[in-house]
Amino acid sequence: MDIDLLEKFRDIGMEIQVHHEMLNDWIIRNYPERDSVKSLKAKIEENIRHLELQREKAVKFVEEIKDPTIRSIFYMKYIEGKEHKEICREVGYGYTYLSKVIKRELLKLKELEV
């Protein structure tokens, strides 16, 4: 479950942004007293809270990885959204080796989840 959140981290961030834009919609800003608008606004805010909790859970999952190098790699890849080439430069790994490390560590983490 947490690994799925890692892989969806950027998408969750974009969903949060879309929901915030929905809150700034003309109808919501100009007719806040209407029950239908209140209900819609409450649903949007609830969705934002749920999505933010998912993001926090993903960050916490990465922060709990014991190996500092792997934690750093996962943070850069999944939380910061950095490309492999940039991660390679920062940790001093080759592209192929980094890909193998990520794949190996994901498999380990998936086994721990079961």
Image: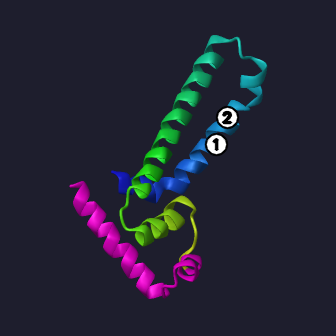
Q: Which residue is mark 1?
A: 18
Q: Position of residue 81 (x, y in %)?
A: 57, 64
Image quadrant where one finds the C terminus: bottom left
Secondary structure mostly taken by the magenta-highlighted segment of the chain:
helix
Please determine whether, in this image, residue 17 is positioned above or below residue 98.
above
Q: Assess disc 1: are there few (<14), some (14-19) or many (≥20) residues with their C-alpha within 10 Å of its C-alpha.
A: some
- Asked whether residue 87 is drawn in magenta, I would say yes
x, y (%) of residue 69?
44, 72
- Pick whichever, 57 or 36, lies toward us: 57
Q: Is residue 18 above or below residue 8?
A: above
Q: Amino acid at mark 2?
A: Met
Picture disc at residue 22: 2
Asked if the magenta segment contains residue 78, the reply would be no
Q: Whole-percent x and y of residue 46?
A: 52, 28
Which contiguous range is marked in magenta?
A: 85-114
Q: Is residue 113 left or right of residue 78?
A: left
* Residue 21 falls left or right of residue 45: right
Q: Which quadrant of the structure image shows residue 102?
A: bottom left
Looking at the rendered structure, the secondary structure element under dot 2 is helix
Q: Compared with residue 35, is residue 64 higher up or lower down, i.e. above or below? A: below
Mark 1 and mark 2: span between their CA atoms?
6 Å
Residue 26, x across and y down, in percent: 77, 28
Q: Left or right: where does residue 98 sit relative to residue 45?
A: left
Q: Residue at left 37%, top 68%?
A: 67
Please, what is the three-letter code of the amino acid marked with disc 1?
Val
* Residue at position x 53%, y 81% in the image: 88
**Which disc, if any, is residue 83?**
none
Question: Residue 35's image quarter?
Answer: top right
Q: Tell me whether circle 1 and circle 2 mark residues in contact (CB < 8 Å).
A: yes
The residue shown at (59%, 77%) is 86
